[in-house]
Image: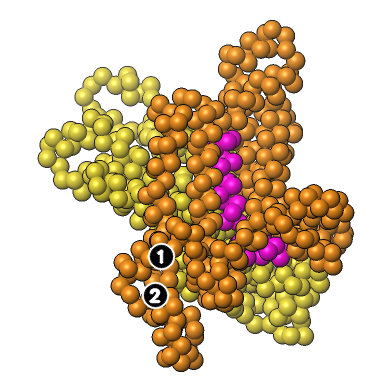
Amino acid sequence: MAQTVTQTNNVPVKPTQETASSPWRDAWKTLRRNKMALVGFAIILFFILVAVLAPWIAPYAYDEGSLTDRNLAPSAEHWFGTDYNGRDVFSRIVYGAQISLWVGFFSVVGSIIAGTFLGLIAGYYGRWTDTLISRVFDIMLAFPSILLAIAIVAILGPSLQNALMAIAIINIPTYGRLVRAKVLSLKEEEFIMAARAIGMKDSRILLHHILPNSLAPIIVTGTLGIASAIIEAAALGFLGLGAQPPEPEWGKMLADSRQYIQKAPWTVIFPGLSIMLTVLGFNLVGDGLRDALDPRMKN
Amino acid sequence: MLAYTVRRMLMLIPVLLGMSIVVFSIIHAIPGDPAQTILGERATPEAIEDLREQLGLNNPWYVQYFSYLGQVVTGDLGVSLHSKSEISTEIVPYLAATVELTIFSMIFAVFVGVNAGIISAWKQNSWFDYICMLMALIGVSMPIFWLGLMEQWYFAQELKLLPSVGRDNPRDAVEAITHLYIVDTILQGRWDQLKDVLQHLVLPSIALGTIPMAIIARITRSSMLEVMRSDYIRTARAKGLGQFIVVYKHALKNSLIPVLTIVGLQTGALLGGAILTETIFGWPGVGRYIYTAIGNRDYPVIQSGILVVASIFVMINLVVDLLYAYVDPRIKYR
C-alpha cells in the first residue's frame, strides 16, 4: 500500500498480490481465519474426494453381496460391516457420497438459476410481473417445504431425478425473494441510473451490473441450501420417494436397514453419520461465508 | 391493532386461494389419465369411467375448480378412495395426534433452546457456551429421521426405558373424546393412562423438536448478546440488580422478539417434519395419513391432507405476525 501512495510520477503501478484489495479478497481473508469454516471446507473436500475416487476407494461393488455374509459386524474385511443383503456398507456409503453431493449441488444450482431469473424480472420490471411472481412465491412458501416436495414427487412418481427436481422447485422462492430484494435496493443506486442514462440495454444492466452485486448473498444462501437439500433428498429417500434400489442413497439405506437395527446397528449408524457430517460441513462453510461476505446478514 | 389485524387477515385470501389452486392441480398434473393411474394397469374401462365421473374429471377444468373450491369452503374435503369415508371426519383423530406431538416438540424446543441460548450468552465464551453452540450446530445438521431411529434403538430397544411406537398402550387404549390423548385421559381421570401417553410422547417429541431447539438456541444467544449490550441493561446493573434478575427479567423480554418469529416458522416446519417422525414412531398423525395415501394413490386424501396442513401453517404464521405486532408496536406502522 505504502508504495502505491508514494508513487508521484505517471507510471502506472501494477497492483501486486499484496496491494490489491477487493471485497472478494477481503472475504477470503476473513474466511481463512475462521477455524470452523476451515473444518467445514475439510469435510466437504473429504466427501468430494470420496465421491470422485469412489471406484478406487470402495473395496466391493455397492449392489452385490452374498447372502451368507448378511449383517456381519464391522471387521477388517468389512470396515462398516455388511447389510441385510450381505452388501458391504462402507462401499455403499462411498458410492452414496456421489448421490448426495450430486443431488445437493444440482438441486441448488437449479433453484438458483430459476430463482435468480424470476427475482431479477420481478425486481427490475416491478408492477404486474412483480405482483404475479411475488404472489406465486408467497403461495409456495405457504406450504411446509417437505410437504410440497412430497406432493411434487407424488405427482411425478418416485425416483432420484424427480426428488432432485422437487427439491429444486421448493427452494426457488428462497433465492427469488433474495434477488428481488437486492434488485429493488440496487435499482435506486446511482450507477444503475447512470447505466440507464447512457442507454444501456436492460439485459446488460441486469446481467453485468445487478447480478454481480447480488452474488454474495446468493453464494451464502446457496451453500446453506446444499446442506438442507442433502437432508431433504435423504428424507425423500427414507420415505421411499427418492432413490430406488439398488442405488446406495444414504436415506434409503437407513429406511431399508431400520428393521435390522437391533441385530446390525452399524447398517443404520454409518449412513446417518455420513449425512450428518456432510450437512455439517456445508453448514459450517455457509456460516463462515455469511460472516465473511455479508456482515449485515450476521446475527 | 384492529386495523392491522384486519389488513393482515385480508392478505391471507389470495394466499389461501393460491393454495387451493396448487392442491387442486395435484390430480391434474399426474402424467396421463389420473383415473388410469389411480386404478392401475388392469382396470376395466367402465371402472375408469366411473372414477372419472366420481372425481368430476369429465367437466372442463374451471367447472371442476370452482366446484372444488365451493366444497372446500363449506368444509367438504371429499371422500377417500381407499376407505370410502368422508375425509373431513376421518382426518380429525390424525390431526389431533399431530397437533399433540407438535405442541410437545415445541415445548421441548422452546424450553431447552431458550435456556441454553440465555446461559450461553450470559456465560459467553465459556466452555458451556462452546458446547451449547457445538450441539446447536450438530442439531441443525442432524437428519431427524436418523435421530429418531437412534433414539428408538437405544432408549426403547436396548435400555427398554420408553415405548418406541404408537401413542398409547394398545392393551389399554385411551377412550377418545377430543382425540388429544393428554386432555382425554385427564377428563376421564385416568392418571395411569396419562403417564403412559406422556411416556409415548417423549422420544418422538425430542426427535421432532431437535432442529427447532438448535435454531432457537442460536437465535436466543445472538439476540441476548445484542440486548445485553444496550443501555437499559447497563442501568439495571448500575442500580445494583442481581445478574439473574437482569438476565431473566430485563434482557429476556426484549430478546424474545426474534425468537417468536422463529417459533412460528418452525412450528410450520414441524407440521411438515412430522411426516418423518410419525413414520418412524408409528405415530398415527396426519403426516402418516398423507404418506399412506401416497402409497394407495388416494389422491383426494393427499390433496385434502396437504391443504389442511398448509392452512394450519398459514394460520400459525398469521397468529405469530399478530403477536409480533403486539409485542413490538413499531411493526404496525411499517
Residue lying at 45% horizontally and 81% vertically, measured from the top left:
B51
Q: Earlier in the sequence, mark 2 or mark 1?
A: 2
Q: Chain of mark 2?
A: B
**Up-down relation of residue B134 to residue B245 (above or below):** below
Q: Is residue B233 left or right of residue B123?
A: left
Q: Is residue B280 magenta?
A: yes
Q: Is A96 situated left or right of B59 in this image?
A: right
Q: Amino acid at mark 2?
A: Gly
Q: Is residue A83 left or right of residue B320?
A: right
Which residue corresponds to mark 2? B56
Q: Residues within 10 Å of mark 2 (few under 14, many from 20)?
A: some
Instruction: Look at the picture and state if A291 lies above or below B236.
Output: below
- Magenta span dominant secondary structure: helix
**Residues in magenta, as a range:** B259-288
Q: Quadrant of residue A21?
A: top left
The residue wearing badge 1 is: B68
Question: What chain does badge 1 belong to?
Answer: B
For this rendering, which residue is in front, B147 or A151? Answer: A151
- Seen in the image, is B245 located left or right of residue B40? right
At 34% from the left and 39% from the top, the residue drawn is A182
Please tell me the colour of chain B. Answer: orange
As measured in the structure, the alpha-carbon distance from the residue carrying label 2 to the one carrying label 1 is 9 Å
CB contact under 8 Å: marks 2 and 1? yes
Q: Position of residue B29 (x, y in %)?
A: 39, 71
Number of residues whose C-alpha sits closer than 10 Å to that of mark 1, classed few (under 14), some (14–19) or many (20 or more): some
Q: Residue A215, position in %: x, y?
A: 37, 44
